Image: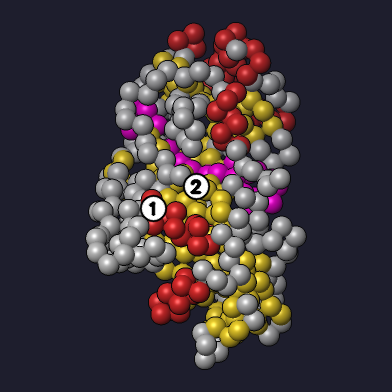
């Protein structure tokens, strides 16, 4: 069975029932696995496909294909390495099912800044040739002086065909896989512009914040006793309260903990009246918003809540994102997910939602 993330989605099932969100729900993009590849798109139909390294590999190589939506959206393809003791400058020889690629066998130049990570942008002509060859080829081998890496192409064609479908390119000249002689891809959806407001209220005195947190924890127990665990004293600092303005408070209550995750509920409280506290609604990959986030924190200077939910201790899969306070609610700003635990770094997780600052 594939290790699945579902961390944020699982939290949705057990989170408290939330009031409906008055603003239009954000369009979170889809993500899907195709054998040894995974692909996803964001709310602007910008899509990414990644090859998945083997489950037992320590040093990995993978392909990353990115393509923005729209008639002029051009694909880019990169080969990435994560290994130890990479030279600052070296060459990579590629082969498809044992045959040199490109056919002339010309190696690609690569550089590594830290000796552990290297990224090689594959030139457009070679990228197009590799995409075409993926219909029949099964393994791309990347050889360097210290060894070789294998990249599975199983599922790559299905992943790229799916991206063509998401972007409306099927049977058009710009399709990656199923090309046509006529037609054009539709324009990309407009990138949403969201303004985050910093917290304008004065920092709460320690005694006031402590009293509010204690009262909110008691109120949660009254409403839903099984939704929030008691935390040990060593986790006391994970409960926090902030003044969003002169009267409205944001309160975070830690409700569950694991080896590498702490899950917290976020509540909006008018003054000290916790009896009327309402859940802070955070939209995610599920069908309903939740007020519970993992490894989350609020930055009062920017008005943003960020989270990073690990599906396992290595931190190579899970979800991450951020939300901005707009004066009425926390609007989603960014969301990334990696639902396969294959040593892929957080920077390569697939973006499912993004926005621009106002």
* Residue for badge 1: 165
Note whether 22 is above or below 356 in the view shown.
Answer: above
How many discs mark residues in the rendered view? 2
Q: For the residues marked 1 and 2, what is the alpha-carbon distance in whole angstroms?
A: 13 Å
Name the N-terminal-most of marks 1 and 2: 2
Q: Is residue 202 visible?
A: yes
Note whether 193 is above or below 226 in the view shown.
Answer: below
The span shown in magenta is: 309-330
Coordinates of residue 134 in the picture (x, y in percent): 52, 70
Does the magenta-highlighted stretch encompass residue 70? Answer: no
Q: Which residue is found at the position 61% from the left and 58% from the top?
A: 36
Coordinates of residue 314 in the picture (x, y in percent): 69, 51
Q: Secondary structure at mark 2?
A: strand
Q: Which mark is residue 31?
A: 2
Q: Is residue 218 visible?
A: no
Nearer-the-camera pick, 358 or 42: 42
Q: Nearer the viewer, mark 1 or mark 2?
A: 1
Does the magenta-highlighted stretch encompass residue 323? Answer: yes
Q: In the rendered image, which quarter contains the C terminus?
A: top left
Note whether 227 is above or below 83 in the view shown.
Answer: above
Q: Which residue is found at the position 57% from the left and 25% from the top?
A: 13
Nearer-the-camera pick, 58 or 211: 58
Coordinates of residue 26 in the picture (x, y in percent): 37, 36
Mark 2, other Cα within 10 Å: few <14 / some 14–19 / many ≥20: many
Question: Does 303 sit left or right of 152 as displayed?
Answer: left
Q: Which residue is found at the position 37% from the left and 39% from the top?
A: 27
Nearer-the-camera pick, 77 or 355: 77
Question: Does 299 sit left or right of 264 as displayed?
Answer: left
Q: Which residue is found at the position 39% from the left and 20% from the top?
A: 20
Mark 1, other Cα within 10 Å: few <14 / some 14–19 / many ≥20: some
Q: Secondary structure at mark 1?
A: helix
Place residue 342 in its image quadrant. bottom right
């Amino acid at each position: 069975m594939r290790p699945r993330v579902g961390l944020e989605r699982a939290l949705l099932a057990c989170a408290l029932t939330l009031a409906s969100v008055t603003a239009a729900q954000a369009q979170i993009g889809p993500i899907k696995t195709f054998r040894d590849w995974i692909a996803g798109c964001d709310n602007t139909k910008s899509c990414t496909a990644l090859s998945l390294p083997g489950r037992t590999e320590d040093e990995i190589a993978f392909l990353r294909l990115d393509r923005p939506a729209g008639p002029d959206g051009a694909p880019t393809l990169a080969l990435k390495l994560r290994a130890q003791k990479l030279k600052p400058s070296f060459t990579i020889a590629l082969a498809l099912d044992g045959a040199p690629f490109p056919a002339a066998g010309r190696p690609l130049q690569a550089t590594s800044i830290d000796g552990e990570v290297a990224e090689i942008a594959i030139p457009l002509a070679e990228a197009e040739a590799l995409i075409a060859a993926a219909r029949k080829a099964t393994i791309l081998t990347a050889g360097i002086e210290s060894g070789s890496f294998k990249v599975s192409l199983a599922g790559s064609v299905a992943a790229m065909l799916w991206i063509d479908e998401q972007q409306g390119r099927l049977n058009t000249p710009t399709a990656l896989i199923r090309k046509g002689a006529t037609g054009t891809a539709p324009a990309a959806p407009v990138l949403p512009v969201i303004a985050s407001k910093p917290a304008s209220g004065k920092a709460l005195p320690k005694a006031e914040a402590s009293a509010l947190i204690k009262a909110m924890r008691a109120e949660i127990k009254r409403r839903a006793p099984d939704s929030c665990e008691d935390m040990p004293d060593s986790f006391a600092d994970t409960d926090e309260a902030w003044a969003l303005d002169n009267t409205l408070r944001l309160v975070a209550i830690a409700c569950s903990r694991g080896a590498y995750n702490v899950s917290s509920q976020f509540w909006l409280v008018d003054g000290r009246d916790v009896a009327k506290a309402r859940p802070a609604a955070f939209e995610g990959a599920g069908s309903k918003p939740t007020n519970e986030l993992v490894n989350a924190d609020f930055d009062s200077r920017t008005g943003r809540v960020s989270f990073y939910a690990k599906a396992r201790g290595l931190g190579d899969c899970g979800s991450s994102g951020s939300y901005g306070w707009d004066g009425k609610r926390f609007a989603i700003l960014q969301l990334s997910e990696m639902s396969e635990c294959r040593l892929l770094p957080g920077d390569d997780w697939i973006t499912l939602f993004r926005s621009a600052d106002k």
